[in-house]
Amino acid sequence: MIEQADALPGREQAVSVPKQHYVSGASLEEPFPDGTETVQLGMGCFWGAERKFWALPGVYSTAVGYAGGFTPNPSYEEVCSGLTGHTEAVLVVFEPAVISLDKILKVFWESHNPTQGMRQGNDSGTQYRSAIYVSDSQQMAIANESLSSYRQALLGASYPEVTTELRQDVHFYYAEEYHQQYLAKNPAGYCGMGGTGVICPV
């Protein structure tokens, strides 16, 4: 992981993204409907990660982007250089009255290997690290409990320590338009997602 002083400078202008989700037609950017919450999840290549969430009942919208680093409004190429500090992340907008954060995190844990550090499968680099970026202290408590529970399950299956980064109030920078809902537009596109096979107790 680079130091902030060594990060690329980025830019003030955010990228332009579609107004509507390619699959659901929901809004891709704020304002989101009353009663929804957001969480950001990093679990490797964001193309396959986003697809895991957009079909879940109670998920209003999803988007892919960059989070957890230093460079404002980075490009995909800059993130892939390792000089921004960002990981590829999915913004999940959900209705907690319909689907709990616990259930979203169950999908998160079971859909990737959160013990690999700066890597996910054959994809290597800081942009592929596992991360949960929550919106408030209540979500943080839920995420901490979920992490602890899955950590025990993984250790019981002889996996090493969980390396998932857990932080609050991390800024989300939207990725370029062609990345949004990529696998809905390109069904045969690359998806390197792969879990450990260890079930996450909710």
Image (spheres, grey):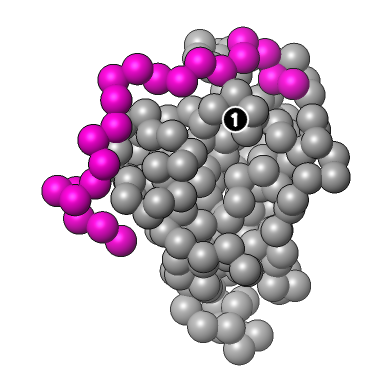
Task: Write down the quadrant of residue 109 in the picture.
Answer: bottom right
Where residue 30 sits: x, y (%)? 50, 14
Horizontal placement of 29 versus 170: left or right?
Answer: right
Task: Say which of 114 and 13 sits in front.
Answer: 13
| Residue at the image position 28 percent from the left and 20 percent from the top | 12
| Residue at the image position 62 percent from the left and 68 percent from the top | 122
Where residue 6 sits: x, y (%)? 19, 51
Task: Write down the quadrant of residue 54 in the picture.
Answer: top right
- Judge the density around disc 1: few (<14), some (14-19), many (≥20) Cα neighbours within 10 Å: many
Q: Amino acid at mark 1?
A: Ala
- Residue that sits furthest to the left in the current view: 5
Where residue 1 sits: x, y (%)? 30, 61
Task: Tell me the magenta residue range.
Answer: 1-22
Question: Height in image: 41 above or below 58?
Answer: below
Horizontal placement of 162 versus 46: left or right?
Answer: left
Dividing the image into 4 quarters, which one contains the C terminus?
bottom right
3 part of magenta stretch:
yes
Residue 128 visible in the shown view: yes
Where residue 27 sits: x, y (%)? 63, 14
Horizontal placement of 125 versus 178: left or right?
Answer: left
Q: Which residue is mark 1?
A: 63
| Residue at the image position 29 percent from the left and 32 percent from the top | 10
Question: Height in image: 188 above or below 162?
Answer: above
Task: Say which of 86 and 98 sits in front.
Answer: 86
Q: Main secondary structure of the magenta part?
A: loop
